Amino acid sequence: MSGGADHLKDEAARAARAAADEVYRAILARAPEHDIDPSLDRVRDVLELLGDPQRAFRTVHLTGTNGKTSTARMVERLLREHGLRTGRFTSPHLTRVNERISIDGEPISDERFVEVWQDVAPYVHMVDARAAEHGGHRLSFFEVFTVMAYAAFADAPVDVAVVEVGMGGRWDATNLVDAEVAVITPVAMDHERYLGETLVEIAAEKSGIVKDGATLVLAHQTDDVEGVVLAVAAERGARVVREDVDVAVVERQVAVGGQVVALRGLGGVYTEVFLPLYGEHQAHNALLALVATEALLTGGAALDGSVVEAAFADVTSPGRLEVVRSSPTVLVDGAHNPAGAEALADAVEEAFQFTRLVGVVGVMADKDPEGILAALEPLLAEVVVTQASGARALDADDLAEVAIDVFGEDRVHVAARLPDAIDVAVQRAEGEEERGAGVLVTGSILLVAEARVLLGRA
């Protein structure tokens, strides 16, 4: 009997997966998430038809250039450790699209994914039809997913949603929540085509998530960026908590499997906190998460230290300086702009003792390949350039031309297919070193997602 039951269960799972994949393909046919049409009207109209589900829960809203997903995962884990039911909306996904919408730390099931789409689809199509009548655009891929996330969270129901913007902030589809706490991680150059050509312009877009009377948790920024953000916060009567002014990373030490940190939050100093993530940037992400949680739950009073320790010790951030293989060690990291690549290089130097490290790098065509490669050059003995699947990926041969300018011809290899690139990198890493060799796959979240599948981590 148990064998028959297992077979039926497997059949049901396969059917649910197929149905979810079919829904995903249909949504994927819409305008891609990087193709922004700056308007909140379409999402607002669908949400109104659904009864404004985004008002059914409290929200922490996050933007910035780097660190959003890791910080969001830490906030969510802290809230869940306090006994709250949580929703988390992040992007992009690494393996399955369901990862973008998580409830209580787990991606929604294939069955639930299909159900949520069926719940919202009539209203999405209604708004699409209205837009078409007036020569407008139908909802984009990301707009549909935002609607689905808010509907799923309201239906669960969750106590708090932790929501990461897709891009920017002011016009981002997520920006219809009235978030009590906004978090802005470090702002750097990225998505210039959509957000602006200067840090000041980008900061103005990202500041758009700050709502009237909210608390803004602000990472350390350049003076220009901070000035823009503080001006917006003042206009909206927001309380601002600034890193290195009001709160700070007091101390950090490298430890096996991560680091031990001391964080000065709003309610006091939390000491001897183990964080199973590598790099100084993750300590600063942890600080932002801690302070956002303090602001939401207590208004700034201290949290229970044992609860904070338990939550942080259980944090994960897949695809962010993640060890996916040993002998040789293979790391993957989704750094996709120069600032992210610099943080990655510093973290690898600090946490690992490689005698020889070979990179596998592929980037999107709208990124800054020279800046990314320049940040990685001191770290890597050689680089194998490749490309992720998809139309946005920069051609491997074009990337090779940039890499040769940065690394010199003798240190650059080309393998357009990622499996071949990883094989070449392993051979080049191990060829001259018996111990201490490693491979780093980076440059794009999509590339990292494919590498994780290839290496059995999906």
Image (cartoon, rainbow, N blue to C red):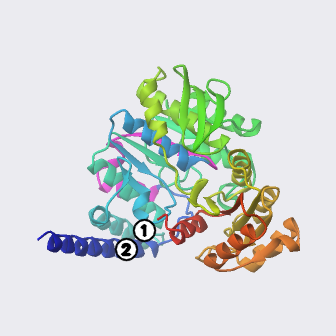
Which residue in the protein does label 2 denote? Answer: 21
As rendered, which of 76 and 183 lies closer to the eye? 76
Which of the 4 image quarters holds residue 263? top right
Q: Where does the image place residue 168, in percent across and percent down from the top left?
A: 59, 52
Q: Is residue 359 visible?
A: yes
- What residue occupies the far front of the structure in this picture? 434
Magenta part of the protein: which range? 41-66
Which three-letter amino acid code belongs to the residue tagged 1? Ala
Q: Residue at x 39, y 75 (%)?
A: 26
Which residue in the protein does label 1 denote? Answer: 131
Q: Where does the image place residue 197, in percent across and percent down from the top left?
A: 74, 55
Which three-letter amino acid code belongs to the residue tagged 2? Asp
Q: Where does the image place residue 423, in percent across and percent down from the top left?
A: 66, 75
Which of the 4 image quarters holds residue 269? top right
As rendered, which of 205 and 385 lies closer to the eye? 385
Q: Would residue 65 appear left or right of 292 to someone viewing this image?
A: right
Contact, mark 1 vs mark 2 (Cβ under 8 Å) = no
Number of the label disc, if any, that sits on residue 80 = none
Dot 1: element: helix
Image depth: mark 1 or mark 2 in front: 2
Compared with residue 416, is residue 332 higher up or lower down, i.e. above or below? Answer: above
| Disc 1 from disc 2: Cα separation | 27 Å
Q: Is residue 35 visible?
A: no
Which comes before the other along the chain, label 1 or label 2? 2
Q: Residues within 10 Å of mark 2 (few under 14, many from 20)?
A: some
As rendered, which of 19 and 323 lies closer to the eye? 323
As rendered, which of 69 and 135 lies closer to the eye? 69
Which of the 4 image quarters holds residue 187? top right
The answer to if 341 sits in the magenta stretch is: no
Q: Residue at x 85, y 66 (%)?
A: 407
Dot 2: element: helix
